[in-house]
Image: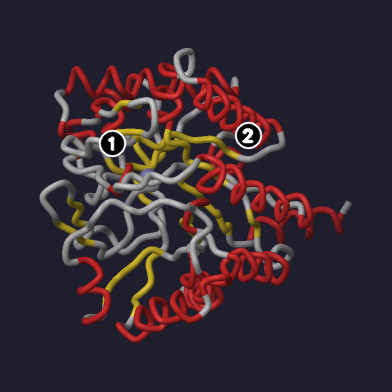
Amino acid sequence: MKKELLCTLLMENKMNIYFTFDYEIYFGENHGSVDKCIIYPASELIRISEEHNVKFVFFVDCGFVLKLDEYRKKYLELEKDYVAITNQIKYLSDTGHDIQLHIHPHWEDSFYDGKKWIINTKRYKLTDFSEAEIENIVTRYKSVLTGITNKKIFAYRAGGWCIQPFHKLKNAFLKNEISLDSSVFRNGKFESNEYDYDFTNAPDKEIYKFNNDVIVENKDGYFTELPISSIKNSPLFFWKLFLLGRKNPYLHKPLGDGKAMPAPGYRKKLLTRVTNNPVSVDGYNASLLGKALNKIVKKRLNHMVVIGHPKALSRFSIQKMEEFVIENKNKFNITTFSKEFLK
Ligand SMILES: [Zn+2]
């Protein structure tokens, strides 16, 4: 009995590590295929999970699932995509992974032309819509996931990290009982014509409550922010990343076969300045997982949130992630939001 208690206490002191994946195709000119952007790389994550008995969090782009459902009766190839995606989501959920809400509302304005998706990102942010439209979108998108998983969906990650100004989303989130957000990463900032976020003044905390503004702590707030862990990268890191991609595409090229939507000035910024970025398992970023973990351990924090995208994983990053999991799964608690926050 005493030994059991000690074990429990030790378990409770272990830091939580969450691997969170935004499950989606690309939104640039070439959106890529469902198989290469989602199904295959996610099946590699399933393999890691099953070999090492760890679970992950998947933020599903449910606007896409809704669109597939809308067009699949007319186009057989979409029926195939729809079945593959919904089966995989259901499998992930049934085997203990977390399925949570990821909203890219530009699907409202996008359509299938018989050959490919015509993606219109003019209204890329949820806050580009009216409050009534936002409520309608959040409710419909959430119900897609509840329908597939039959489980409580309560956590959110904003598409493109665009969650500001949060007060426009607040009512829709309250009504849908979305109480946990993981969109913020400290000191992140980006601005373009289509989208922007500014987390420069976010609290220097690994978890906090908020109410009207996602970067202002409010101890009595209804919502919890569990930010994505943040890391400082020198330009040298991104030079290496881009050069390696050219030198050894087999190892370093993303598995997804599409192209990201343009982010003007972003690449130049990465290559010329020290930048704050989310701790990520995508591509060459995965080489920094150990370094990021050490920093978080030194600060004696309880949560490490890693972001990734099946489409942006590479053979290299899958290998690095697997090494990280093997090394750390017993030292730390690799876990999901449902396990830690739905008690
Ligand atoms: Zn996304």
Q: Return the residue nearer the eye: 121 or 308.
A: 121
Q: Return the residue nearer the eye: 42 or 98.
A: 42
Q: Can you tell me which quadrant of the image ligand 1 is in?
A: top left
Residue appearing at x 30%, y 48% in the figure: 28
Could you say where residue 24 lies in the image, as x and y percent from the top left? 45, 42
Q: Is mark 1 within 8 Å of ligand 1?
A: no
Q: Return the residue nearer the eye: 120 or 7.
A: 120
Q: Quadrant of residue 251?
A: bottom right
**Residue on which disc 2 sits:** 88
Q: Quadrant of residue 233?
A: bottom left
What amino acid does circle 1 point to? Ile
In the rendered structure, find residue 330 and report the number of the disc placed on it.
none
What amino acid does circle 2 point to? Gln
In the rendered structure, find residue 119 and report the number of the disc placed on it.
1
Could you say where residue 114 lies in the image, as x and y percent from the top left? 38, 25
Could you say where residue 91 lies in the image, as x and y percent from the top left? 68, 33
- How packed mark 1 is, by other alpha carbons closer than 10 Å (few <14, some 14-19, many 20 or more), is many
- Cα–Cα span, label 2 and label 1: 24 Å
Specify whether residue 298 is in view: no
Q: Provide the secondary structure element on which disc 1 rests.
A: loop
Residue appearing at x 43%, y 34% in the figure: 101
Residue at the far bottom: name it.
Answer: 236
Indicate left or right for 278 with 342 as reference.
Answer: left
Q: Is mark 2 within 8 Å of ligand 1?
A: no
Residue at the far top: name it.
Answer: 73
